[in-house]
Image: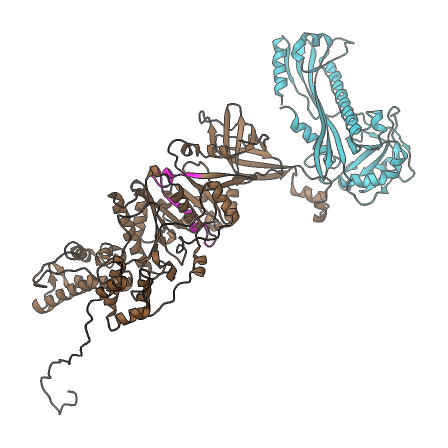
Chain colours: A brown, B cyan
Amino acid sequence: MPDALPIGRVVATELKPATPHQFHFWTARESPIGIGAIVRVDVPGRVVFGIVTDGFAYSDLDAPIHDVIGADGDPNLGGRAPTERAEIRLYQAAVLRQVPEQPMQPVPLGAVFLAGDADVAEALRMDAFLGGEQPTGVPVGVYAAGGRDAPIFLDADFLLGPEAAHLNITGVSGLATKTSAAQFLLASIFQTFPAHRGRVAAVCFNVKGPDLCFLDQPSEVPEEDRGLYARLGLVAEPFGNVRYYAPYKSDGVNLNTLRSHEALAANTVPLVWGLREVLDYAEVLLNRDDVDAKAGAFIDFLKERVVGKPFSDVTLSDAPLEVRSFADLEDFFRRIFEFLEVQSRGAEVWRSHHVATIRKVRNRLGNISVRAKGLVTDDGAASDLPWGRFEDRSLHVVDVAGLDPTVQDLVFARIVSQLREHLEKRQLGVEQVVVFVDELNKYAPADGPDTYVRRMLLDIAERGRYLGLVLFSAQQFRSQVLRRVVGNAGTAFFGRMDMDELATPGYGTLSPSTRAKLAALPKGELMVRHPHFTQPLFVRFPRPAALTGRQGVERFPPAAEVSFPAAVARQLRGLDPAVTTPAIELLIDGRREEDVRRALHATRRTRPDNVLAYFTAQLGKKVEREVVDRRGVAPLKRNGGDPYA
Amino acid sequence: MASTTWTRLRRAVAARGFTPASWIPAASEGRAEEATIRPARLVEQGEVGGIAVGLAEPWPDPVAFLDGMQRYEVMAYAGASPVVVAEVAGAVLERHDRQLHAALAARRRLVIARPAVLADLGDAIEDHQAIPLPEDGPPHPVHDFLLARREVDAARGRLEVELGHSFRARSDAWLIVDGTLTESPQWAADGRMLGVCKSHATLPFADTDLEQYLRLPVGHRSPVFQPAGHDVAPVWSWALRLWPWEGRDLLHGLVRIEAAPRDETLAQVDQLSRWLIAERSPVSTPDPRWDRLLYGIRAVEQYLRASGER
């Protein structure tokens, strides 16, 4: 309910008339009104809700020179005039809603009240989705003005689809805006997403440092923030069902993530792909100069006919070939070249593919396994996200922070494609998936090459909502992101902004005061745009209840890089804490590292009851080293007189 | 601009068969004064040419300002006799902590016409105070209008006096009035009231004394004198130069102050002058009378203008 007493009155002049979308009102000088405050204009038969977008103060001073004259030119005397000049506080407000909506009329010259909880809900049209049998409200923060506050909700149908979808967050780095806002909103979605709208999961890509590496670890939530959680009807707790995925480092046993503390190993799993997984997305790794039409055709041939299925060609082998790994592929290429050079006596064409094309594809694909070492396995067995088994309210964090940018692209492209494919077939396990991508400036720049990832992000932005594939994206400079990607985001958050960014045309619709407020927005405050809100709204959100990256690294320092046996032991201890390094050293002594890795990956995939026994079985019988005599070819001629022989 | 009340009244009057009129004299037109010299009696010894009052000092709280306003127009004619409608208003703004607040305000609506005309108007003017014009001759539109204007002046004066009495009855604050204190014997005798006269149509000196009087330097005052001709409500007075006149006009920044004819006035005259000089800031621009118009008085005018019916 509004206050009994008005805080201002609408004024309209010929120069500043009230319109159906904007009006002006004055207040007392001590009024608590500020930029972003929601007000209510009440006249018989009509109620108008508005949000303050600008403020003006002026006195009856005709020209600055008169103040100078009044003070005898002495600034010290200026403030000592016996009477303070009459001063007016005039505010400009944009109309949020008129009741009744029709006929649309200029705002009447009535009393202005500060909006209360119910007013805020009505002004922002939240009454449409908070009431009824199937409410779809998702708390996003608390609106505060004039000493009062009100919880603000987003409509899940417009945040996660199908009506509208996607969220874009803009803000300068280092002010706990983008990552914190995304974390808080995900937590809010997980706690409040209505069951009648289906199941929801999220996949987050950790692209820098330890930002998202500790979302399952509780943090200290200050009392003030606890109050905000309570006001929003949320519980301040970290994510409960989180799984981390990180590729190996180049050694194949240490995970390439800052979340490598042993205490966190239980839900941190390797992300390892084989040839099949990589080849489907070779386009991501190979640029257009690499893949011309001929090379593309040969890669298609490999994908369709060779990889992952028996391939029979008597010119290469009597028995069908099985190409499942990069090692198998290398053997396959070797057989082709051997056939061309030896059996065909220097022929240049194999199955209509020129040898130069084959060599080029071999080089490029071989290079992938080097660049993506740690992600790509040679043994052909993948360790991947649980496709088809996504659980409701589960969070999957893929740590790509330590990867080569091109390999990051590969990870991103394949995971998003898999999400899309599974959602299309309704086989993912959930109906909605939120994909969170930071640094959109980098992945979908407004200018720059039209990369696979950029096209994919555009595709999600434009068509994802029909599938339940929702993009939560963030960047520092919205103006530098592909317009169609951010433009398709139904909801947008704006944290503290850089003045240069605010000077770009995209922010031209904001009033100068709103832009000034954005430029100095404190931590934990956001400006929100949402389809139900006809004007942007400032809200305050509590800090996430999970550790930040920096806190997490301090509490769970990354494990030091250790020797190969110790790393293997540490990996196995994630499955069985009884495994010791000396035992592993004894077991793998004299074994080839690739064999050990293969056994380790198999053990991790299977997660057997008796870890050590299974691992030992996977290692297989130890083959003792045998020193083989060098069997060289005898020289054709021994000529002791030849000093160069 | 005609108010909604006057618009309604105009329709009602026209409906009764009166001839509509649209003669709107300047609303800010002040009361007419005849330019003359009326030699005053010096109360204080000293050079008419100027007594330095010292540096400006802020007036201690509280202090109040009183002013009034009037507007009128010929609304219709009954034959040749005009029907004048008028509004008079007055207010006191009191200052605390450098902020002015409305302490008292009053507003009256008048209809002035010959008695027969007022009778014909009947209940159409029931919201207004009816003031009859004397019927000492045949109706004359200009003569009757001038008489009506005099009635408006008088009504405004009465309203201001009432407000001043009310305020002083309930407050010990100094009350500064725009214009003369001689409107009321009670005002003239009040030791906590000052009149600030911007008009110099009536001058208290002649010849050399007048030249000295008009050439007072800034921050100087004349000796205290008693203006002639106010036997019912005598006051003591002095001139004070608020702003330098050199290069502008002899009357630039020159005000005449009126106070109660008491010994305390003589004792306080420099102190009062210093307080008044402090009141020249803030400057009352863009009012063309800014050099003589105290900001507090101007604030009352603005208050009355802004709070009047549109």
Horizontal and vertical percent for residue B215?
Answer: 82, 39
Q: Which residues are magenta?
A: A153-179
Nearest to the observer: residue A26 or residue B256: A26
Horizontal and vertical percent for residue B263?
Answer: 90, 35
Question: In the rendered structure, does residue B80 fall within the stretch colored magenta?
Answer: no
The quarter in which the C terminus of chain A is drawn is bottom left
Q: Left or right: B213 with respect to A343? A: right
Asked if residue A17 is positioned above or below residue A637 in the image, the reply reads above
| Residue B215 visible, this angle | no
Q: Return the residue found at the far bottom.
A: A641
Q: Left or right: A533 with respect to A30? A: left
> Which quadrant holds residue B153?
top right
Horizontal and vertical percent for residue A4?
Answer: 58, 30
Question: In the rendered structure, does residue A172 fall within the stretch colored magenta?
Answer: yes
| Residue A73 visible, this angle | yes
Q: State the residue at coordinates (45%, 61%).
A: A554
Asked if residue B105 is positioned above or below residue A423 in the image, the reply reads above
Give the mark count. Answer: 0
Asked if residue A350 is positioned above or below residue A396 in the image, the reply reads below
Asked if residue A631 is positioned above or below residue B73 in the image, the reply reads below
> Which quadrant holds residue B149?
top right
Nearest to the observer: residue A171 or residue A436: A436
Horizontal and vertical percent for residue A611?
Answer: 27, 62
Nearest to the observer: residue B285 or residue B192: B192
